[in-house]
Every structure is written in structure tokens, then in C-alpha cells.
Amino acid sequence: MSKGIRARYDQNYAAIEDDILKMGSLVQDAIRNSLESLKQRDTNLAQEVIDRDLWINDLRFKIEEACLTLIATQQPTAGDLRAVVAAMNIVVDMERMADHASGIAKTVIRMGDEPLLKPLIDLPKMANLAREMLSDSLDAFIKRDASAAKAIAPRDEEMDLLYKAIFDELVEIMAHKPGSVERATYLLWCAHNLERIGDRAVNIVERVIFMTTGDMRELTF
């Protein structure tokens, strides 16, 4: 690239990064608020999470359009092209994360005044871990730090173990208290949504590694 084209590319790509961070902040808010609505049985907050999902969707499409425009007009190559492609994939995963948070909020509304089956212990841990994984993966993306990205992926195992603990406990409750099945299922849905957010964070990590090294593969741990 000439200096002029390089400067325009850097400026346009910086704007994309800013929007990705803005989207990440909105997704983190959605995760936090969806769990808070569950803890407080706050259907108004739950509805707010659902409504704001539209903002996240719009931002995803804005970022994708900016990426496509950058590819068409600047024709980036090598590492620059990988960065743009990674950005496009990352916003898809973040939009899906927001969908999962919205799924929790919809469950809260569906529950209505139904009391919680049990105190929330591991679900808030899952939510906090999901937000941390998202924040750290985006930090690795901005810094182009493959080592930091790789360190995030094994934390999904902790997420899976928390989900398994919740699943096993709720199955045990349902086995001994048949009347608890509906309320247990609500909590299982919430836990499953959080577990999927962790999986999406690992997808982002894989894209960061691809962007920085050119190595595209599924991480195993």
C-alpha cells in the first residue's frame, strides 16, 4: 500500500475496532442484565435486554458493511485481510452471544411470578466467567496477542464444569420432586445459554489466533 492508502486503511480499520469494542460492551451489559433480571425476577429489565438486542444486531450489520467496504476499496492483503475477516466473524459470534442473553431474558418473562427453584449459586459464576472471557478475548484481538488468546480457551472447561454441576443438581431435584420439572427446566435453559456464550468466546479466540498467525483450527484442551 502507498502511504496515503495505508493511512486511509488504518483510519477505517480503527473505526471498525472502536465499533467492535462498543458492541462488546453492549453484549457484556446484556449478559449481566439478563442474570440480574433472573436474580431479581425483574421482567422490566428482562424486556430491556430483549429490546436492546436490536441495537446489537444493527451494530453487527454496520461493522460487517464497513468490513466489506474496506475489502472492496482498499483491497487489503495478508495480515490486514485476515484482520478484517476475523472482525467479520467476531461480530457474528458476539451477536449470537447477545441472542443467548436475550434467551435468558425471555425465560425470565416466561417464568412470570414463578418462584426460583433454588438459590442461584453457579449461574452467576457462569455469567461472570462469560463476561470475563469476552472481555479478555476482545482485548487480545485489539492487541493482536495470540498468547493471551490461547490462555483464554481453557477457561471454557471451567464453564462446562459449572454447567455440568447445575445440570446434575437439577436432574437430581427433578428425579425426587416431579413437580419441580418446569422450574428446573427454566434454570437449565439459562445455564445452557451461558454455556453457549463460553463456546462463542472460544470462537473469538480462534479468530484472534488466525488473524495473528494465519493458523485456522479448532482449539482443543
Image (cartoon, rainbow, N blue to C red):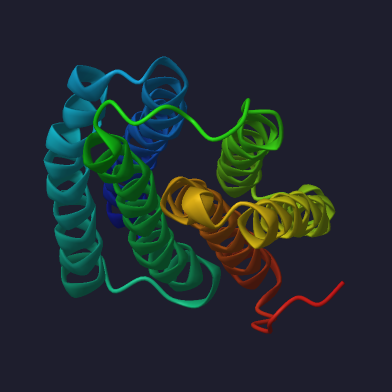
x%, y% of residue 20? 37, 42
Using the image as rendered, state which of residue 86 and residue 131 is in the foreground: 131
Q: In this view, does 81 lie to the left or right of 135?
A: left
x%, y% of residue 46? 25, 28
In the picture, the quarter occupied by the N terminus is bottom left
In the picture, the quarter occupied by the C terminus is bottom right
Q: Which residue is drawn at 48% across and 63% down?
A: 83
Residue 5 position (above or below residue 219):
above
Q: In this view, does 192 lie to the left or right of 173?
A: left
Q: Residue at x 73, y 53 (%)?
A: 149
Using the image as rendered, state which of residue 6 and residue 30 is in the foreground: 30
Residue 143 position (above or below residue 144):
above
Using the rendered image of the protein, determine whether residue 179 is visible from the camera's viewpoint. yes
Residue 56 position (above or below residue 70):
above
Place residue 93 in its image quadrant.
Answer: bottom left
Q: Residue at x 44, y 20 (%)?
A: 36
x%, y% of residue 142? 56, 42
Q: Residue at x 38, y 52 (%)?
A: 100
Using the image as rendered, state which of residue 131 and residue 162 is in the foreground: 162
